[in-house]
Image (spheres, helix red, strand yellow):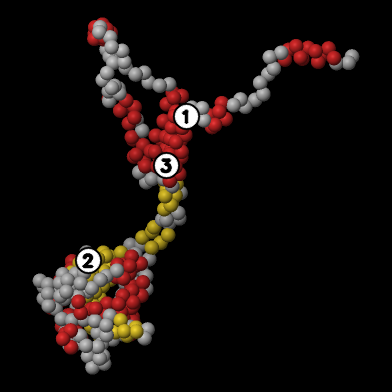
Amino acid sequence: MFELAWPWIFALLPLPWLARLVLPAADSGEPVLKVGFLQELESLAGRRARLNLPTWRQQAPFVVIWLLLLCAAARPQWLGEPMPVAASGRDLLVAVDVSGSMDFPDMQWQGEDISRLDLVKALLGDFLQDREGDRVGLILFGSQAYLQAPLTFDRRTVRTFLDEAQIGIAGKNTAIGDAIGLAVKRLRQRPSQSRVLVLITDGANNGGLIHPLTAARLAAQEGVRIYTIGIGADPQATGTPGLLGLNPSLDLDEASLREIAETTQGAYFRAHDGAELDAIGDTLDRLEPVAQQPTQARTAKALYAWPLALALLLSVLLVISVQWPDNPLQRQLRKPRFLQPHPQWRQRLKRLRLRRPR
C-alpha cells in the first residue's frame, strides 16, 4: 500500500508564489542608464518598475521541480502486509561488570585462555540472541552504572553493544548496587511478573552510592527478579597469577550475590564455563510470560529517491538549456517530426494528374 508519511508537506505548495509577492524584486541598486531626471519620472508614474511574472509555459518546469521536491519531502513509502510481532512479556535487563578485573585471562573457551569479559561476550551474546519474543536491554557498570541499550526487541543491536564493550569504560571499581538501582528504575514501568535482571560480576562491591543489599530489597519491593552470576575460575584450578601474585577470583563475594538472588526470588550461578548460562536460559524459559497486547508491524520501503532524482535531472536539463541553448539535445528537440511539404506541391500534383492515362 502506498502512503505518504508527511502529507502536510504539501501545505508548502504556494510558498514560492507567496515569496514572490512578499519579497521585493531583485535589484542591484544601480540604474542601467544614468538619467538625471529618473526620480521625477518615478514620481510621475507613482510606482517603481516591477518585473513581470513569466508566462505559464516558462513557469511550468519550475512548478514541476517544486512538486517533485515536495513529493520527496513527504516521504513516500510502500507499506507491506501487517506482520505480527511476538511479545511474550519478559523484560530482561543484563548488567555486565566491565571493571579492570574482568580483563583477567583465566577462562577457557575453545581450547584458549581468554579474559572473563570475552567469555561473557561469547556466551551471553548467544543467550541474548535466543531470547526471541523478549525485550532485552544492557547495562554496563564499573565505578558507575550506565544504560547502554534500553529494553528493545532488537536483540542483534543489544548484542552488538555487548561485543563493543571495553574494560574500564565505566570505571575501574565495581558498583553492584548502582547497577541494580538503575535496572529497577528501568523495569518498574513494566508488568511486575516479567521484570528480570541478570547480573554478571567477578568481584565484590567497592564503589557506587547504594549498597547491593539495599538495592536488592528495593528490587524485591518492585517485583524485579535478579539472577546473579559470579564469573571467574577457581583460584586452585588456575595457575595464572594476577596483580601482585593474587588471583582476582579471591575477591568474588559469593555470599552477597547469593543473598541478592534469594532476596529477589532469583538464583545464583557460579560461571566457570557456559553450563551455568544455559541453566539461566532454562530457568527463564520456565517463567510464566505475561499476556500483553499483540502488536503488528509493517515493512516500509522508502520511495523518496525517485521524485528526488527526477527533480535533480530536470534541474540539470534546465540549466543546460539556459547556459548552452544550442546544445545537441536542444537541436534534436527542435528538429521537425514530420516531412515538410514541398513549396510547389500544387504544381506537381497537377502534372501527375495530366500524366494519368485515360
- Mark sitting earlier along the chain (3/2): 2
203 sits to left or right of 337:
left
- Mark sitting earlier along the chain (1/3): 3
User: In what quadrant of the picture does the C terminus appear?
Assistant: top right
Q: Is residue 64 above or below residue 46?
A: below
Any mark on residue 324, and which?
Answer: 1
Q: Position of residue 98 (x, y in %)?
A: 22, 74
**Residue under the image location 77 percent in, 14 percent down:** 349
Viewer-closest of 220 and 333: 333
**Marks 3, 2: nearer the viewer:** 3
**Residue under the image location 38 percent in, 66 percent down:** 86
Q: How many marks?
A: 3
Residue 262 visible in the current orientation: no
Mark 2 — residue? 147
Residue type, label 1: Trp
Residue type, label 2: Leu
**Residue under the image location 30 percent in, 23 percent down:** 26
Mark 3 — residue? 308
Viewer-closest of 300 and 282: 300
Residue 243 visible in the current orientation: yes
